[in-house]
Amino acid sequence: MKTVLIVDDQSAIRRLLSHWTQASGYEVAEAASAEQALEEMSACRAGVVVCDVHLPDHDGLWLAGELRRRFPEAALIMTTGGRDANLMRQTGAVDYLMKPFNRAQFQAALQRGSEWNRA
């Protein structure tokens, strides 16, 4: 079963996205910061990473660069509640979600990430 890493500093959002991810048949790992996300990736090698742009230690753009460098096989899905769409495009992400997004949009992004990872 493929693992999805959810990276968001808001615990309520992590819980909701984790629930939606598990309901889609994936295993889930969670991280509240960029540094924690890198630790989780080293431990679980998630095939898909869902990452918020705004994180407390390093931003999601920094994390996206680190993930591309250290774990190029992982599909990246970026999320934001701000107007960061242009910045997100620079990350090489498979998909981008603007908050608030719904369950169907999230699951479609997970599917794209999963398909990208198999390619």
Image (cartoon, rainbow, N blue to C red):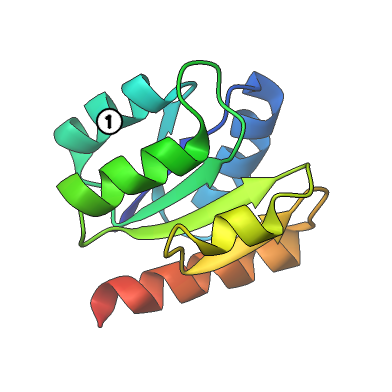
Say few, some or many: other residues with alpha carbon within 10 Å of mark 1 (under 14 / 14 to 19 / 20 or more).
some
Q: Is residue 58 left or right of residue 70?
A: right
Does 25 sit above or below residue 51?
below
Does 11 sit above or below residue 106?
above
Q: Is residue 11 left or right of residue 34?
A: right
- Residue that sits furthest to the bottom in the current view: 119
Report the amino acid beneath label 1: Leu
Residue 23 visible, this orientation: no
Q: Which residue is drawn at 43% across and 68% down?
A: 113
| Residue nearest the observer in this picture, 113 or 83 | 83
- Residue that sits furthest to the right in the current view: 100
The x, y position of residue 24, in whole percent, is 53, 60
The x, y position of residue 15, in whole percent, is 62, 30
Q: Residue at x 49, y 21 (%)?
A: 32
Identify the residue under disc 1. 38
Q: Residue at x 78, y 49 (%)?
A: 83
Q: Residue at x 71, y 66 (%)?
A: 105
- Residue that sits furthest to the top in the current view: 57
* Quarter of the picture holding the C terminus: bottom left
Q: Is residue 8 left or right of residue 3?
A: right
Asked which secondary structure carries label 1, the reply is helix
Residue 75 visible, this orientation: yes
| Residue nearest the observer in this picture, 89 or 95 | 89
The x, y position of residue 22, in whole percent, is 50, 48
